[in-house]
Amino acid sequence: MTSTRSSDTLLHELKQIASEVINKDVSVDAPLMDAGLDSIGATELSNKISAHLNTELSPTLLFDHPSLRSIVDALSPSFESSPARDFESDQDAQVLPTVAHEVPKRAISQTSGNAVQSISGIVKSLQITL
């Protein structure tokens, strides 16, 4: 028996989290911003997904993948090849790309870099006030 999440299970879990953040039922195929997700909600949703999956996600995940289904499609290769999966030979094992936060700075556009810095500043100021 395997303990990995299927794409359908992950999609259901993310739908529950997103619906909680937005305070209404969310379609898995509709853009989250159209469902009422704003920038503060996007930060909250990203943090909740990160905590739920016990992993650090790219700060731009929700902008690069605007619907829950596209987020699951982007995350699924990571979970389908997790160590909890039944044993595979080294020849069959999938090689995963490096995580987004390890991308060289030259690969991040100036606009993305500024957005990430702005969000980081907001988060730090919120942490200080709390």
Image: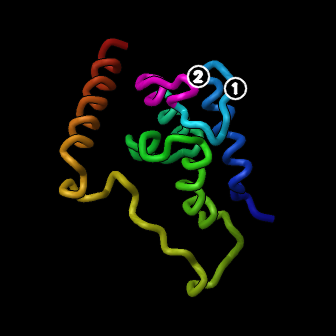
Residue 3 within the segment the image draws in magenta: no
Q: Quadrant of the N terminus?
A: bottom right
Region in magenta: 33-43
For badge 2, the amino acid type reads Ile
Say above or below: 5 vs 50.
below
Q: Which residue is mark 1?
A: 25
Q: Position of residue 55 (x, y in %)?
A: 49, 47
When the figure is inspected, residue 23 is found, relative to residue 4, above or below; the finding is: above
Q: Is residue 37 highlighted in magenta?
A: yes
Residue that mark 2 sits on: 22
Q: Residue at x 57, y 45 (%)?
A: 53
Look at the numbered disc 2 and give the secondary structure of its residue: helix
Give me the residue at 20% from left, 54% from top. 105
The number of callouts visible is 2
- Residue 6 lies left or right of residue 67; in this view the side is right
Q: Of 32 and 98, which appears nearest the observer?
A: 32
Crowd tier of the residue under label 1, counting other residues whose Cα lies within 10 Å: few below 14, some 14–19, many 20 or above: few
Residue 117, horizontal then vertical, whole percent: 23, 35
> Left of 25 or right of it: where is 112?
left
Of all residues, the one furthest to the right in this rendering is: 1
- Give whichever of 73, 87 is nearer the camera: 73
Image spot of residue 82 (x, y percent): 60, 63
Q: Amino acid at mark 1?
A: Asp
Please rate how many residues cluster around mark 2, counting C-alpha atoms within 10 Å: few if below 14, some from 14 to 19, many from 20. some
Question: Horizontal placement of 16 versus 119: left or right?
Answer: right
Residue visible at 34% across and 51% down?
Answer: 101
Foreground residue, 74 or 103?
Answer: 74
